[in-house]
């Protein structure tokens, strides 16, 4: 099955996201999908909290003059901003934008908060919905008109060096985040012509989807003093001078959910990393006539044993076990426990791993230990498998050869790395190879230009 | 100090919410305020999850024709809906509303999900921002143009009885919620002319603010089949007939945060219920020359002991202890521990309760136990105190006397209860008493009409 077909199919069958809302690019996170989202963003929230970031919440509406204040920034967004023009039947004096991103509201407030160097650093984040009037083809959780989940962090510092270090911290946080989810990535410095509107430079994380196209899954921007000059975020330095704050910002969106689905899934359905699986262990009682009671009793006993430590569910629906197996395989539950009369007699428990589709038995007494070990094992395995596929998608060439590149990108696809040379690193190269330059990247110790077909 | 002045002042000084954003009725949840919000909504989230509700997330934009589908509903909202008319420079074919509430998007989807009676009940909720183009005077966290936090639950059932029971369940969940926060309430059935647009009837929770005006803090609506008929949410009954779903919905907003602040606070600042306090225990080292090390060491020792169980913070800023005390009193930290050289010598610890402003000493060995007990005690105490003030605000009259009512409502204020009589229960009564009829209510076993000045 072709990837994009598989992807739409799985969103529906695993009950992740319903696309049938009557606005293009807007849909519904269903309860099962919502839980994946919740556990996933809980990971990044913890990483940010631990590293001294504060969560806050800023307004969704931005007055036109505020959004337009930074010239580069507004140029980058004006074609895709939704505008509110009326309240009730009244025409508004000033048009209001639905935030496409929140630099302008946040930096307007930062000006009010920053007076002296001791007010800095500020490290703040919010998890909100943002909006883009996409004219391109929309795709669920990948290219949305309502980005339902945007985790955006914004920082301000008193020195350039501190802002540089903040970029490094952000990259290291995002690495931990994607490593926790087993999502492989290539980090590159985006070319000048593709950086964030208003930034000094942009660092980006790209992963590779099963169809060989790259997906930008995170960005980290060093904003220098561009925004602080525009928004007058001025502080008194230790020596009594005035300076503008040095800023960074970095974001992650619903695309991380799309990546969890796409990167780990297989032809049978989802394979969820245990850490974000709404159900980590599903118990399926195998009911045989006359044995109903002892089977259900044992199922409940196992449930009680596991529930303090794992997210566990008993499937007691009145349908064939085969259908239950299938449902939970589609939904990517990492581990299944089958409870049948024979096993009960032998004091054994049958387990099934979704990632390898293997069945195996353990002694009842070892259950807790084995479940924990197996879940860790599943995580390791799906992470390694994902990185292996990722590495296989990378082709290193010794020099630029447009025809060869076009060829690889239409057959094998993935990312092509060519040794970095200043003289070829320009926008024309994109035309020559009919693909996107992701940017400069380090790969196994060498510096390359990364080229790919992107989402 | 007058209440509304106190309220604005405390929002600023305790760093809850910054009103200086350049759109009326839109502001910023600051980190400290955000944490209160987060812990508060975590309580309701748990209560809903435990009672079989599923969290989901629906689009923020609503096409005009969808919003206008239910006639009563749109009439109730059309004057205060924000309209998006443009995407970039393109005028949209269909205007899009910013959700004022989500009946229409959610019920559009429910139609797609419901086919047979076994698809019911559906009990779903989301926590989102909603928008009202308020023409009235706005107030932070009370009357906003962007309601930053709206927890709305929506249910569909196969029988009228089940929907009735759902209303009861919702009321009992909200009781538990407000009880956990120590917020007193009067529950009443809103009069016909004040029910939710499109509902059969509306049950509401009102609390009383320190200025004697009531504040609606939660509503529960029985929607009957009004919306299901409009949105064609049709199911096959067990007997093979077709019927329309029976629906309810119920909501809670940022007003609960305003209530926590207003109900429990005093002239010194906030008094936070420990369960939602971002810092439950603050440790203030009392530094004396030559004793710096032993004091800081002991402070850290206490911190390490408490941190597994409580949200604890050491204030090691280089400022006078008196200023620290003041800061944390304003921010409503329930319990303060003062660590000084003398106490260390005597193996004692000095504690300070924010609610009673009492200082007392305990043996070091009893610390954990006393902290836990005192926090529970503080919760009990502020809850009882709040209910006492609330009861004092209630005046029971034997009959309607407009002058007397006007008099009470301009002097003592609060809520007036008059024995329920069908013949006086109408909109004209509101004009006569120059106040709002909250509705029919039961109070200590009797049925009354509740009258008040409202927010």
Image (cartoon, coloured by chain):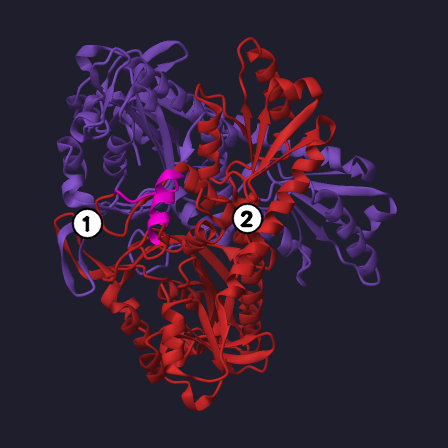
Chain colours: A purple, B red
Is A398 left or right of A358, judged from the image as shown?
left
* Disc 2 crowd, CA 10 A, few/some/many (<14, 14-19, 20+): many
Q: CA distance from mark 2 to mark 1?
A: 43 Å
Residue A126: % across, % down = 37, 38
Q: Which residues are magenta?
A: B4-20
| Quadrant position of the C terminus of chain B in the picture | bottom left
Which residue shows up at 76% across the image and 49% down it?
A339
Residue A293: % across, % down = 82, 60
Q: Is residue B214 visible?
A: yes
Chain identity of mark 2? A
* SS label for mark 1: strand
Residue A413: % across, % down = 34, 29
Give the residue number, with chain letter if any, for mark 1.
Answer: A96
Asked if A228 appears above or below B153 in the picture, the reply is: above
Is B406 left or right of B395, judged from the image as shown?
left
The numbered mark, 2 or 1, whose residue comes first in the sequence reads: 1
Which residue shows up at 53% across the image and 54% down it?
B44
Give the residue number, with chain letter if any, for mark 2.
Answer: A330
């Amino acid at each position: 099955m072709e990837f994009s077909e598989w992807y739409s199919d799985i969103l529906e069958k695993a009950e992740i996201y319903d696309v049938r809302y009557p606005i293009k690019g807007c849909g519904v996170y269903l309860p099962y999908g919502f839980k994946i989202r919740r556990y996933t963003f809980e990971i990044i929230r913890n990483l940010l909290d631990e590293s001294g970031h504060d969560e806050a919440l800023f307004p969704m509406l931005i007055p036109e003059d505020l959004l337009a204040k930074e010239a580069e920034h507004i140029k980058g967004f004006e074609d895709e901003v939704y505008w509110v023009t009326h309240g009730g039947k009244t025409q508004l004096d000033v048009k209001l934008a639905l935030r496409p991103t929140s630099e302008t509201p946040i930096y307007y407030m930062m000006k009010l908060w920053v007076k002296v160097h001791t007010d800095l650093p500020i490290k703040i984040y919010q998890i909100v919905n943002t909006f883009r009037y996409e004219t391109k083809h929309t795709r669920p959780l990948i290219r949305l008109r309502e980005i339902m989940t945007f985790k955006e962090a914004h920082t301000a510092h008193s020195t350039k060096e501190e802002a540089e270090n903040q970029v490094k911290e952000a990259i290291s946080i995002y690495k931990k985040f994607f490593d926790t989810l087993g999502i492989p990535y290539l980090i590159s410095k985006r070319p000048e012509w593709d950086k964030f509107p208003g930034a000094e430079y942009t660092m980006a994380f790209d992963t590779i989807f099963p169809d060989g196209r790259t997906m930008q899954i995170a960005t980290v921007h060093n904003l220098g003093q561009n925004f602080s000059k525009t928004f007058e975020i001025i502080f008194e330095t230790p020596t009594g001078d005035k300076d503008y704050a040095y800023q960074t910002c970095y974001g992650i969106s619903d695309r991380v959910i799309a990546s969890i689905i796409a990167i780990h899934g297989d032809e049978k359905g989802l394979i969820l990393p245990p850490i974000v699986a709404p159900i980590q262990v599903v118990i399926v009682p195998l009911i045989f006539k006359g044995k109903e009671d002892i089977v259900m009793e044992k199922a409940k006993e196992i449930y009680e044993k596991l529930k303090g430590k794992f997210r566990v569910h008993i499937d007691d629906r009145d349908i064939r076990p085969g259908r239950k197996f299938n449902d939970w395989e589609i939904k990517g539950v990492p581990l299944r426990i089958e409870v049948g009369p024979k096993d009960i007699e032998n004091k054994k428990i049958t387990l099934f791993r979704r990632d390898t589709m293997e069945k195996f038995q353990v002694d009842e007494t070892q259950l807790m230990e084995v479940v924990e070990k197996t879940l860790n094992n599943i995580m390791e395995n799906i992470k390694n498998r994902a990185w292996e596929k990722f590495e296989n998608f990378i082709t290193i060439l010794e020099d630029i050869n447009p025809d060869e590149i076009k060829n690889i990108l239409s057959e094998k696809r993935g990312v092509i790395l060519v040794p970095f040379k200043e003289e070829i690193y320009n926008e024309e190269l994109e035309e020559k190879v009919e693909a996107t330059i992701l940017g400069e990247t380090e790969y196994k110790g060498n510096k390359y230009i990364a080229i790919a077909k992107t989402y």
